[in-house]
Image: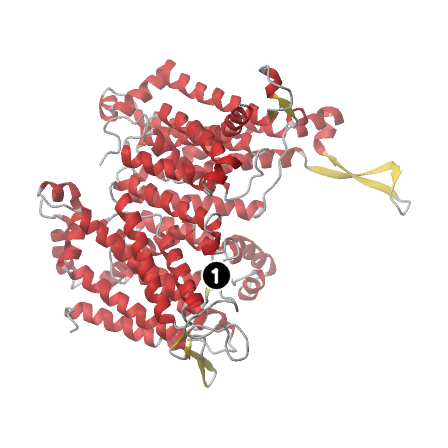
Amino acid sequence: MLGLTGKDFTLFLIVVVMVVFAPIILNPFPVDSAMAQFNAGYPDLMQRFLIFGIFAVGFNILFGLTGYLSFGHAAFLGAGSYAGVWMFKLLSMNVLPAILVAMVVAGLFSVVIGYVSLRRSGIYFSILTLAFAQMSYALAYSVLTPITNGETGLQLSLNDPRVLDGAASADGSLPVPTFFGLEMRDSWDVTLGGWAFTFNAGYYLCAIFMLVAFYVAIRIFRSPFGMMLRAIKSNQQRMNYTGLNTRPYTLAAFVISGMFAGLAGGLMVSMDPLAGAERMQWTRSGEVVLMTILGGAGTLIGPVLGAGFIKYFENIFSKINDNVLHGWFAFLPDGLENAIVWILHPFVGKGWHLTLGLLFMLVVIFLPGGLVEAGQRIGRLFSRKKKPADAAQKSTQSTPAE
Amino acid sequence: MEAIILQILNGLDKGSAYALIALGLTLIFGTLGVVNFAHGALFMIGAFCAVTLSRILSLSHTVIDETRTDFLGNPAKVEVPYIYDFFGPEFGATLIDWAVPLSILFAIPIMIAVGVIMERGLIRHFYKRPHADQILVTFGLAIVLQEVIKAFYGANPIPTPAPDAFTGSFDFGALIGMDPYTVIYPYWRLLYFVFAMIIIGAVFAFLQFTTFGMVVRAGMADRETVGLLGINIDKRFTIMFGIAAAVAGLAGVMYTPINSPNYHMGMDFLVLSFVVVVVGGMGSLPGAVLAGLLLGILQSFASMSAIIELIPGINQVIIYLVAIVILLTRPRGLMGRKGVMED
């Protein structure tokens, strides 16, 4: 259905259900319970899941399929964010033009950078993209201040022209992003027994875009174009020898993933109309690399899982402080309790990046396929019957048409 | 004329830091074929060796000084470093003052140990994996090292001054017969440059004039044949990794008075050092040194106000711009060897 094979359609359907019911699924603990701090079902975090999911899915189209490791994708996210805020400032507070323009600007930007960077491959490509991204970051901070508003970050103001719908809302305050009148921050709270669920307009707008993006990614993965990209990954030289010019294909992949990043940037400013230069820094590009690898590069669902995983733990882990830890281990004798808290202390709260770094290293060393491979291995443990089929599949995969 | 000399001098100290880090990166890449994204973290660890030593030296205990009284009339409490007790106050004060240069001795064994552990424990398992995997795992390691330092030393920069003898500046212009007070240059920066040149010279001499260095060079050219000749090349490469780590660490130790160390200084330098390596030519040691100094000087010229007025923002992007142009026009870099990392 929808041009997908049965298996892909099931996957897509699962993702649709998960995304639509996320406000419920992510709030499994009653509000008053001690576990309520593990609830992720608040709009701000759920929006970030989806936005970074889009970003990572797009990055995966480049890295997972062609193997080109870009360390500069944050530049496109940043360019999209700036374009989006400018649309809010100049045209109207409707999010649609902002998001579309963000995609177009990021796409054009990635055509330029991709055209130059893709002339080299391997580590040189990584360093070229890194150099371009750092350059945009430095420029956004300094010379381009009239466009980017430098360190302060670009934000809305009451003096903006906003040709279509005026500078200020009726009561003279700053207007908020809307979708044809529907404000992005509108939420409906539903209380059910001890549970509270928040259904947020902005979240569902992100959801629509994310599902479309995910669908496009599936189609690209299964298309002849996707096959061509995989061929480039496995042996680009041979592709060239057969008389095929690979550069248009890699450039197309680069631009597509740049546009995904622009879409993520546009959505980001639609939820919170503020764009800062630090969004373009290379450590941000590193973050999307982490997400993709952690989830499983080259798989469909991996980047989404990775993005959700990192954003969830970033929020939840960084909230755990010593008091919370003491609360958990209160049943132990005092000495032991203090010892455990002392050991765990560097890994939680502000030290969350340490945990992330360790986790990432473990994944790269032991699970090159990321969370998806972990899931497959666990699945294989429980279904022994499937083993011959798996083995057969593996043997076909490991011997590409030499 | 004065302005030009001043900018060259200004570029030298930053350029020597780039050159030292890039030299270590190239050593690792040339011997082991590994792209080490954690090299900036080694630079940072070196800087924190200096911080640690100066903290150890100034560990102190409280003594009641009967001769002085505080505002309430009680005997004043004075913090006295332990080192005063061991060596007497005068020599003790000198030791604390010279903490940064002393850290060189302290940092060398630590950095070699860190490097060897890194190579034996982690990186050797990645020789056969693709370059992307090497980048990723060392990137992860860099995050971990940086966060560990942050956990111990906090997120703020820690000022670590140079010895009093080197805090001043001197009149470089007068030295070469120009008007006095036109070209003023701090002692420590000059010292940094001289130190960097000594280290670079030592590394080159070690590779060129010792049997060990000869074997390593042979191994860089053809690892397999050297192995077949019955030489344990892996062990020598591990030691070279340790030396590369020590070079980066020493660059960090000596850089502390110029720039107070903080936990992300490694990442800041890493990106630029990679650019330097690529500009110099992947796998070429003289190329790395030359490109480091050149880019340092270029950057300092680009920050002249006359040039910034001409092309705004050029000081921020000049290095990247040069790297992009070089990569596209001279893919092998300034002095790159044929057949290294070409695709």
User: Residue A102: horizontal and vertical position, in percent?
Assistant: 35, 62
Other-residue count near label 1 (Cα within 10 Å), few / some / many at <14 / 14–19 / ≥20: many
Q: Nearer the viewer, residue B75 or B320?
A: B320
Instruction: Decide if residue B80 is on the left or right side of residue A80.
Output: right
Left or right: where A238 falls relative to A58: left
Up-down relation of residue A58 to residue B298 (above or below): below
Q: Nearer the viewer, residue A4 or A31?
A: A4
Number of callouts: 1
Disc 1 is attached to a residue of which chain?
A
- Name the spot of residue A333 as percent of width and height, x first: 58, 61
Residue A302 % position (x, y): 29, 60
Q: In the rendered image, which quarter is residue A391 located in?
A: bottom left
Q: Which amino acid type is marked by label 1?
A: Phe
Q: With respect to residue A400, does A6 lie above or below?
A: below
The residue that label 1 is drawn on is A317
Q: Is residue A64 visible?
A: no
Measuring from the top left, give residue A132's x and y in whole percent. Answer: 36, 45
Disc 1 element: helix
Examine the rendered structure and indicate whether residue B306 appears above or below residue A78.
above
The image quadrant that residue A394 belongs to is bottom left
